[in-house]
Amino acid sequence: MIKIAYFSAEIGISSSLPTYSGGLGVLAGDHIKAAADAGLSMCAVTLLYKEGYFKQRVDEEGNQTETYPRFDPDPLLKRLPVTFTLRLRERDVWIQAYEYRYKGLNDHEIPIYFLDTDVEHNFYDDRQITLRLYSGDKDHRILQEAILGFGGIRLLEQLDLMDIETYHMNEGHCSFLVLGLLERFNGNEEEVRKRCHFTTHTPVPAGHDHFSMERCKKLLHGLLPEDLKLPSIVQNSRLHMTELGLYYSRSANGVSKLHGIIAQNQFPDFKIGAITNGVYHPFWIGKTFRELYDVQLPGWRENPNRLLEKDAVSDEELLAAHKSLKQFLLGYANSQTQKALSSDVLTVGFARRAAEYKRARLIFHDMERLIAIGHGKVQFIFAGKAHPQDERGKQILKEIIQNANRLFGKVKIVFLENYNIWLGRLITAGVDVWLNTPLRPNEACGTSGMKAALNGIPNLSVMDGWWAEGCINGVNGWAIGDTETSDDARDAAQLYDLLENDVIPTYYEDEKRWLSLMRESIRVGVRFTGYRMIREYTDKYYKVKSQT
Ligand SMILES: *Cc1c(COP(=O)(O)O)cnc(C)c1O
């Protein structure tokens, strides 16, 4: 019998399944992969977005356009002989379940269930519900989350998975599941609470869903309990999904030490701990390193601590493996952008969702200084998607591209379209330095820097999220700012100082120290793997106290 059911609105498990948008989904995929290797008894539940998130095009002026190629689930996923209905908008909506069995290193499998309403008998409007991730208006989101939460619980009942000991909610999008359980246990709150765990992922208020109670009642008539009036959950007639999940959970966590503290202040009514995210190292470590380790450190996939065996890989091998990954990335970048990036030039990577708090603008704060420092010495690779309805995010992309155009002939900056898992691995394995400049303390964790570190790439980042834990300044990378505040002008000045006085001269003139930065990046990176993360979840939150 399966013991843990992991619910997430997005899961990024393979480049072929566009069922994720960014960090949350990629993390969910890595969580499942690490759990499979650890042999955990787990299944996962999400939605099938046949038109995924979207495919991104960005033109020469920086305008993003989206297309929605439809993927065919049939060759990748198994259509389960399970269909059932959920009553939404006062009519029955049919749900079809698909299964993807993720197989871990020792052949232990974790089934991932994808729920789909694009079913023949459904009305046109109902077929759209699960078609696209994070699409539509608030009503649409309520319906999607109802399919995930209520529908997910119903699916597990259909599959006879009735002995789940832990329902792990990855963010508030899945919180309706607690109400599904409440119904099963005839309103007994304790029965629900002893089975649920909640992970919160962002201190940014917009990252927490809340819906008009009136709309919920209208759309979910018959699914919501009559007496859902708890003050923390329903505030100003709005249903707060994070509060709902937290209220019915036995335990909860944030996703880095710093974020745990922030989240505790954000939700003072609940006890919130912390487990720092980790990345699935056998995937994120680039091919040349994988081949090297397979020969020299067998067992490194099962246990990344093997990477700590320092002298197993020589300096020459380390440099050669990195160089080959860099050339592969630059080859791709040059084929896409015709900007002739050179593999002899220090290459800095910056790739993430176009969100305001990520402050992509910081490196452009003082263009004259950037040119003075960087001309001929540094080149940048950017990537990232803006949510289709996020005009501010689209503006950020425009600013990056227009600044890149202004720097033409002085500092090379390329933007690579359609950031996804495949491109993410290419970039986080192939640049020389990883840059991250969030506005503290909004980066709950950040995982792309961990991917870079495991590829021997030093981070140059604001002391936020995981980097506040992982940074040994000057040893495995560089710290921007302190752990207290963020300020654009000050952080930018420090970023330029670091580039000018340390990063650039070290890269070109001190190979010995650079090698040491690379080795230390890997050494510290080993603390930020899914391997470590899944053991922490198992010890702290998945162990069920014997119910006597
Ligand atoms: C790792 C990854 C992310 C998350 O990166 P952050 O550093 O947390 O912003 C987002 N998208 C893709 C495609 C990734 O691979």
Image (cartoon, helix red, strand yellow):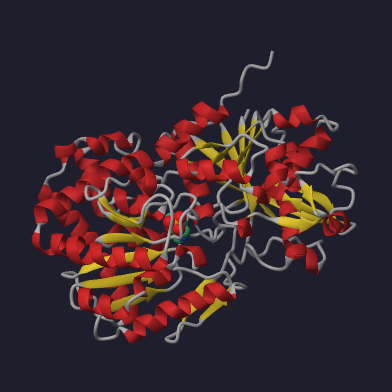
Quarter in which the C terminus is drawn: top right
Residue in the image at 75% along x and 44% along y: 232
Q: Is residue 181 above or below residue 125?
A: above
Number of marks: 0
Which quadrant of the render holds ligand 1? bottom left
From the viewer's side, name the closer residue of 129 and 78: 129
Q: Is residue 83 above or below residue 398?
A: above
Percent across and percent down for residue 194 are 69, 28
Q: Quadrant of residue 93?
A: bottom right
Quarter in which the N terminus is drawn: top right
The answer to whether residue 97 of the structure is visible from this angle is: yes
Residue in the image at 36% along x and 64% along y: 490
Percent across and percent down for residue 464 are 42, 51
Residue in the image at 48% along x and 38% along y: 275
Q: Is residue 425 above or below residue 280?
A: below
Percent across and percent down for residue 181 are 77, 36
| 105 relative to 517 in the view: left or right | right
Percent across and percent down for residue 72 are 59, 63
From the viewer's side, name the closer residue of 107 and 281: 281
| 319 relative to 522 in the view: left or right | left
From the viewer's side, name the closer residue of 391 and 156: 391
The answer to whether residue 355 of the structure is visible from this angle is: no
Residue in the image at 89% along x and 48% along y: 222
Q: Is residue 474 above or below residue 344?
A: above
